[in-house]
Image: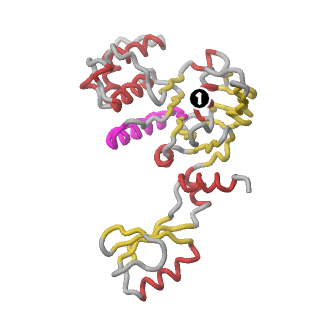
Amino acid sequence: MTSALEFHSVSKTFHSRGKTVQALRGVSFDVTEGEVFGFVGPNGAGKSTTIKVMLDVINDYEGEVRLYGVSAREAASRRGVAYVPESPALYEQFTPLEILRMALDMYDIRRADAEAWCMQWLERFSVAQNAKRRIRELSKGNVQRVALAHALVVEPRLLVLDEPLSGLDPVGRKDVVDILADYKRDGGAIFFTSHVLHDVERIADRFGFIHQGELLTTRSPRDLVSERADRFIIRYQANAPLDGEHAAIRDGEYEQELDEPALPAFLSRLQTAGGRLVTVKPAVSLETVFFKILEERRPA
């Protein structure tokens, strides 16, 4: 597989007002063609710095970054790369159609059907009905859709997204997830950052957890969850909740979280009490795994 993005032992230190902050600490990972890579971590973890390094906004770092084999310090590396920030700054006096036409011009893409091509992408993001309204007149969610259409209209090889589902309603989130899945199937590579680990579970083939500039692990969601699936959520029906911490779902229905060794005894008590088991599912999610990893790394 061809590497779309490579980070090799990248470190970056900031000096400000007599303070030194190491934003990245020997970060190494790669993203291949046709892969979706999620980059997650808390505020200040180093996600934005990582994007600025790959796009050459920051270039005084240690290590090496390559996009499709070309050093990120060379302008040629960004041919075929599109980026959507968390808060897109689109020209408010322009229309979505004008914004997309501008993208084609900036990438020197000449198409006889340019307007129809742009309208096709606005349609895919469900904003074609606003094609000739000013950006300033659109909702935050629709501006986000226009920004994503602006990135994809140029058919990039690598798509860099910062919180791509931010500001979207549930329908918009599903639409964007489906469009990104199509882009991936066509061989495009995606690098995206997110605070919302549920989004990573929905989109990413692999993810990296970054904390205080250090990449803690790079795995697939399925692998990491399966390794640590040692707790379960039990939903059951009974006249009263069984002993232990529980949550009432509705009258006569409860949820309880248990370690795996405690399951047999709990189910036996439930049967004795005349209750009925509804579901058993792993309690672990990427979010719980992330906090467990952080807890393990805290100084004693």
Q: Could you tell me residue 177's position as x and y percent? A: 41, 40
What is the chief secondary structure element of the magenta stretch? helix
Q: How is the image coloured?
A: secondary structure
Q: Which amino acid type corresponds to the residue marked 1 in the rendered image?
A: Ile
- Vertical relation: 208 (above or below) 71: below
- Tell me what residue is drawn at x 34 percent, y 43 percent: 170
Q: Quadrant of residue 213?
A: top right
Toward the left, the furthest residue is 129
Specify the segment rendered in magenta.
Answer: 168-191
Q: Which residue is mark 1?
A: 51
Q: Could you tell me residue 233's position as x and y percent? A: 47, 67
Q: 129 or 46, which is in the foreground?
A: 46
Q: Could you tell me residue 220's position as x and y percent? A: 58, 49
- Vertical relation: 280 (above or below) 274: above
Q: Could you tell me residue 214's position as x and y percent? A: 69, 41
Q: 250 or 74, which is in the foreground?
A: 250
Q: Quadrant of residue 28?
A: top right
Asked if residue 279 shows in the view, the reply is no
Q: Is residue 8 magenta?
A: no
- Tell me what residue is drawn at x 41 percent, y 25 percent: 147
- Tell me what residue is drawn at x 58 percent, y 60 percent: 226
Toward the front, the furthest residue is 17
Q: 287 or 282, which is in the foreground?
A: 287
Q: Secondary structure at mark 1?
A: helix
Asked if residue 169 shows in the view, the reply is yes
